[in-house]
Image (tube, rainbow, N blue to C red):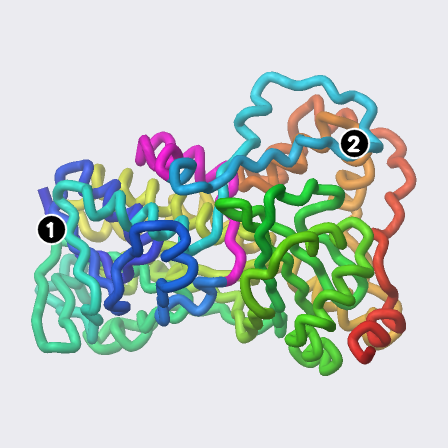
Amino acid sequence: MAGIVICGGSVIGLCAGMMLARDGHEVTVLEGDPDGAPVTPDEAWAAWRRRGVAQFRQPHNLFARFREVADRELPGLTDRLLAAGCVWVDFLDPLPPSIADRAPRPGDERLRFITGRRPVVESVVATAAAEQPGLTVRRGVRVAGLVAGPSAVAGVPHVTGVRTTTGDELPADLVVDATGRRTPAADWLTGIGARPPEVEAEDRGFVYYTRYFTGPRRPPRMGPTLMPAGSISVLTLDGDNDTWSVTLFGLSGDAPLKQLRSPDAFTRVVSALPLQAHWLDGAPLDGVLAMAGILDCHRSLVVDGDPIVTGYLAVGDAWACTNPSAGRGLSVGLVQAQLLRTVVAAHLGDPATLATAFDEGIRAGVEYLYRSQVANDRFRVAEMRACAEGTPPPQADPVWSTVQAVGMQDADVFRAMVEVINCLAPARDVLGRPEIAEKLAGPPPAPPPPPPGPDRNRLLQLLAD
């Protein structure tokens, strides 16, 4: 068995570590933040500070793909999340009122998932990791760089360990970067003479304003989880232990939206959204939390079919990250951890094959999620900007527009949409199924009316009052 070092001790780094340790490897997770997980969910929310994770207190979702992978690779994790107060979410309960066929279908249970606030979820994962034989988590240890040894591929640096900020060197048969969207990978790799990763990056300019609430009853879902509303979007998510969150986001260059930092302005705007106003019916847990500067970013360690480094792989946001409103990050990361486990079992002794097999698996299995989110972000930015400037909106994707229109009338097409949202399958595969393609082939119904909410002028009034 091998010695493996994972840089980064968040949800994905810890889950990857547990999977590899269960295969008999000796795994060390290095986490720069010093504080370990609190014991209770209340302490995790109120007291845990993860300065290395900018989005730690922003909303997260654990879609059905996360649960599916966890149940296979980390049995018992779902039960631990439930015991900590995380909750089941079912996008089929209720179905939209416009769908007449409300009969259940075989396989509906696959579309359900468990979710909770990020600090609570991570505390559960950290507790499980602490109990995992073969896994050591060292907190307060920062990685300064990589250590290189003899090349496994001519002209390509090979990583044989890491160097910490205190000067210690930890040897490893494999180093895994799980340090997140702020990964120092480029500096680490150039430091050992490797080419930097091939990077695609673009700041979409979104800024997020979030408020958490608690109450005796979770608000019923009357509209979509993520809903466009002119020059803003609204995101409503369930949390653990009788909590939930409401997020409004728009473009960072849209100056009037800065008023959303004010709880009063935030409340006025949400109150004007008929499908979401009742999500304010609880006690606020804090003020309005703001976050900006989120990049859509993709890093490739295999360029033109050849690895730029061996003995080093990246998972989660260190591989690619997007606008978090879709809530896919943890699901995508756990799929990568699952793939990592598979390729390590098959190819650890062959560094070149390990690098290319992991890259091929990612491209085939999850890269479509990154690409689709980038396309969605570009469209939404253009749509928000047009609304703010009073110019014609961009043309929506006609295929997905048809899916949405039919899905609001047809129970099976709606389930297909939920399957895509849950990261369970690519849209091209789901929509290509004969029974779904047949339902989409006829004349499309009239598009559904735009979601109810304030127009631009009314939004500006609400912000200025």
Amino acid, disc 2? Leu
For the C terminus, which image quadrant? bottom right
Left or right, residue 353 beside residue 349: right
Left or right: residue 340 compared with residue 56: left
Q: Is 60 part of what is drawn in magenta? A: yes
Q: Residue 3 carries which label?
A: 1
Question: For this rendering, which residue is in front, 36 or 379?
Answer: 36
C-alpha distance separating marks 2 and 1? 51 Å
Label 2 Cα neighbours within 10 Å, binned few <14 / some 14-19 / many ≥20: many
Q: Give, as a three-letter code, the residue at label 1.
A: Gly
Magenta-highlighted stretch: main secondary structure?
Answer: helix
In the figure, 97 relative to 302: above or below?
Answer: above
Viewer-nearest of labels 2 and 1? 1
Q: What stretch is highlighted in magenta?
A: 58-80
Image location of residue 283, percent across then percent down: 61, 57
Which one is nearer the viewer's eye here, 144 or 201?
144
Residue 460 in percent (x, y) is at 83, 75
Q: Which of marks 2 and 1 is nearer the N terminus?
A: 1
Residue that mark 2 sits on: 440
Q: In which quarter of the image is residue 81?
A: top left
